Image: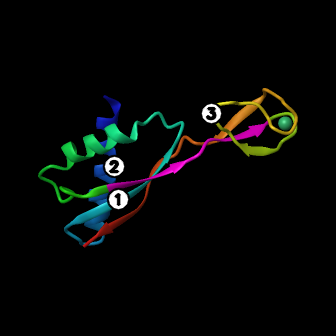
Amino acid sequence: MHEMSIAEGILDVALDTLRQHDASVIHSVQLDLGLMSGVEPDSLLFCWEAVTKGTAAEGSRIEINTIPIEGKCLDCDKTFPVENYKFICPYCDSHFVQTIGGRELQVTSMDID
Ligand SMILES: [Zn+2]
């Protein structure tokens, strides 16, 4: 399950931040998660609970901010939100669409003490 290694990566970032701020408890972690990141939010939350056991982040929450998929048309250069994985330009019907957003996976802020 790759959510497990992702949860461990987030925990590493969180514990580093904790040390840098001389804090001892993590209450919550805010995360930007793109719809195309390939991460299943439910299973990430489950893994988070498992990897944080016995650490300063035990009992903390992950708050997921879902980032929509954004496409850029390579024919007319316009950008637009991609819905239902339809990679077709709404302006010129082109199929040459590049994904420019939706793969985010990053910690944006944390609530620590
Ligand atoms: Zn276009």
Task: Answer with left or right where residue 72 lies relative to residue 10.
Answer: right
Residue 98, horizontal then vertical, whole percent: 71, 34
The amino acid at mark 2 is Ile
Residue named by callout 2: 10
Label 3 CB, ligand 1: below 8 Å?
Answer: no
Comparing 61 with 52, the one in front is 61
* Quarter of the figure that contains the C terminus: bottom left
Residue 18, horizontal then vertical, whole percent: 27, 65
The amino acid at mark 3 is Asn
Q: Residue at x 15, y 49 (%)?
A: 53
The secondary structure type at the circle numbered 2 is helix
Task: Answer with left or right where residue 99 lies relative to residue 102.
Answer: right
Pointer 3 or 1: first along the chain: 1
Residue 44, horizontal then vertical, whole percent: 33, 41
Q: Is residue 104 above or below residue 38?
A: below
Q: Is residue 87 above or below residue 91?
A: above
Pointer 2 or 1: first along the chain: 2
Q: CA distance from mark 3 to mark 2?
A: 28 Å
Q: Are marks 2 and 1 in contact (CB under 8 Å)?
A: yes
* Crowd around label 3: few <14 · some 14–19 · many ≥20 (10 Å): few
Task: Answer with left or right where residue 82 lies relative to residue 104.
Answer: right
Foreground mark, 3 or 1, reads 3
Q: Number of marks in the image?
A: 3
Residue named by callout 1: 29
Which segment did they paint magenta?
Answer: 62-73
Comparing 81 with 112, the one in front is 81
Foreground mark, 3 or 2, reads 3
